[in-house]
Image (spheres, grey):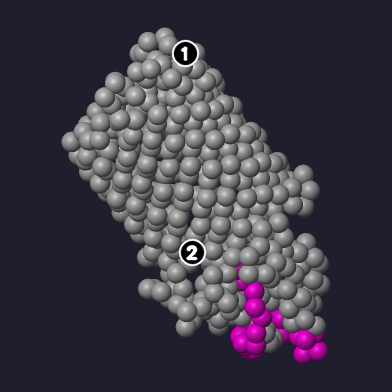
């Protein structure tokens, strides 16, 4: 049996080229095929590859069904079937197909190591849709530990205290339902940040989520997600938050152009917030937050002749905050922009700069928040209405160190986050308008299984 397919490793596969020769290594069922059937099987597999590349996995399954009737012992057949099933959302069926391909290669004596590696990589990605574990640990230096964003401004704690910090996060997701047209995911998270000396601002987050998604049509996805988080500050209860988020998302068909649309989504979110510390009635922030938003993601090829892709994203969210007090009732306008750039070798476009086969990614995100308060401020010297502008920039360089089908991935992140916050508040006759800044420099190690 001659198989003329070799994979281009990575998330995007799909070139077919002459290569692997399994003659004399297959078992009896494959040897019984006549040589006249080989070109027919090869043409069917070639057609399936092209259909998968074009995002037409249903049509690819029909070609693979024909190939299976002719040559069921072909490991490439089962590899491509796993890819098609995965693209269609049949995660468990995809893992079974990848396992069948691995078993056949083992029977043949593992004659094609690149194919074996590619099967392991894609099976791991499919398994992660059923069970995924993330653990992150890192160190950072914070120039304003006591600034907690809009939450901190309530307490008057933007004092600019500097400190080092140690943090860790565990995130687990399990999907008991992973079918073509529906997905149910249950998740839990636990995060801690300990400051070296400013212990009253040690921070913990305990959270859980449930998400259900269903395909309304081939590319339309409807989802409903519930999140619950309880936050502690200085080992004392600080904030309890419930969030319910229905959303609608459209998955665009991939194209061969340099830049193409990936996903378009709209959502509504209802947050129920309870701040767990005593305060004066007029400063009470307990209440509901209604949010609506729109998001758009794109993909692009950073270099010609490369299968590697980068990501672009932009979005807008409108928040309506209604509290039991009066001071912090407001409308927030949030604008988002993000980009990820794979750092590639220009002389070898499919290789990364430092470790050719390990991901090296530069990410940039910026968020602009404009807060328009609805009442005259009790904090302002002249009782004017408050306006806030908070801009946050995040730069991250991520180098993958380990990538193993059984042991998982190990990635090193270097990060710089800068928050520039401004307000028109005047607390006294001689005071300048209220401003507060925060810069965090840090390094983080992430293990993903």
Residue 237 covered by magenta stretch: no
The quadrant where residue 89 appears: bottom right
Vertical position of residue 194 compared to residue 416: above or below = above
Label 2 vs label 1: CA separation?
Answer: 45 Å
Label 2 environment density (alpha carbons within 10 Å; few <14, some 14–19, many ≥20): some
- Residue 122: x %, y % from top left: 57, 64
Q: Element under label 1?
A: loop
Residue beneath the point at 30% across and 30% down: 432
- Secondary structure under tag 2 reads strand
Measured as percent of width and height from the top left, residue 119 is found at 57, 69
The residue carrying mark 1 is 325
For the stretch drawn in magenta, the main secondary structure is loop
- Residue 107 is situated, as x and y percent measured from the top left of the image, at 59, 76
Residue 8's label in the rendered image is none
Q: Which residue is mark 2?
A: 341
Q: How many marks?
A: 2
Dividing the picture into quadrants, the one containing residue 144 is top left
Asked if the magenta segment contains residue 26, the reply would be: yes
Q: Residue at x 45, y 55 (%)?
A: 364
Horizontal placement of 105 versus 213: left or right? left
Q: Residue at x 55, y 83 (%)?
A: 111
Q: Nearer the observer, disc 2 or disc 1? A: 1
Q: Give left or right: position of 80 versus 107.
A: right
């Amino acid at each position: 049996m001659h198989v003329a397919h070799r994979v281009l490793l990575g998330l995007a596969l799909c070139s077919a080229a002459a290569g692997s020769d399994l003659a004399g290594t297959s078992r009896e069922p494959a040897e019984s095929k006549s040589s006249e059937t080989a070109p027919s099987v090869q043409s069917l597999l070639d057609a399936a590859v092209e259909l998968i590349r074009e995002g037409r996995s249903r049509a690819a399954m029909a070609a693979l069904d024909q190939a299976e009737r002719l040559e069921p012992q072909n490991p490439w057949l089962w590899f491509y079937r796993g890819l098609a099933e995965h693209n269609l959302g049949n995660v468990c069926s995809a893992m079974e197909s990848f396992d069948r391909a691995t078993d056949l290669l083992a029977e043949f004596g593992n004659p094609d190591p690149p194919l074996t590696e590619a099967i392991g990589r894609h099976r791991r990605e499919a398994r992660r849709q059923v069970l995924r574990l993330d653990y992150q640990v890192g160190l950072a230096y914070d120039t304003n530990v006591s600034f907690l964003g809009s939450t901190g401004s309530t307490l008057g704690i933007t004092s600019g205290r500097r400190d080092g910090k140690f943090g860790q996060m565990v995130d687990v997701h399990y999907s008991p339902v992973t079918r073509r047209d529906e997905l149910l995911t249950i998740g839990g998270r636990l995060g801690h940040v300990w400051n070296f000396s400013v212990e009253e601002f040690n921070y913990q987050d305990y959270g859980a989520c449930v998400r259900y998604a269903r395909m309304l049509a081939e590319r339309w996805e409807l989802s409903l997600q519930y999140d619950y988080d309880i936050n502690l500050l200085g080992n004392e209860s600080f904030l309890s938050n419930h969030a319910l988020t229905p959303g609608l998302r459209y998955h665009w068909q991939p194209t061969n152009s340099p830049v193409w649309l990936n996903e378009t989504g709209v959502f509504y979110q209802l947050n129920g917030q309870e701040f767990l510390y005593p305060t004066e009635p007029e400063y009470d922030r307990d209440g509901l937050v209604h949010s609506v938003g729109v998001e758009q993601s794109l993909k692009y090829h950073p270099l010609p002749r490369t299968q590697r892709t980068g990501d672009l994203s932009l979005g807008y969210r409108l928040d309506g905050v209604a509290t039991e007090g009066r001071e912090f009732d407001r409308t927030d306008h949030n604008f988002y922009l993000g980009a990820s750039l794979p750092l590639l070798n220009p002389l070898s476009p499919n290789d990364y700069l430092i470790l050719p086969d390990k991901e090296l990614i530069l990410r940039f995100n910026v968020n602009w928040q404009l807060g328009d308060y609805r009442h005259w401020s009790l904090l302002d010297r002249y009782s004017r209405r408050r306006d806030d502008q908070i801009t946050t920039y995040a730069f991250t360089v991520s180098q993958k160190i380990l990538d193993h089908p059984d042991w998982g991935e190990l990635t090193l992140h270097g990060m710089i986050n800068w928050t520039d916050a401004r307000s028109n508040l005047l607390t006294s006759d001689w005071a300048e308008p209220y401003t507060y800044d925060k810069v965090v420099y840090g390094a983080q190690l992430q293990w993903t299984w």
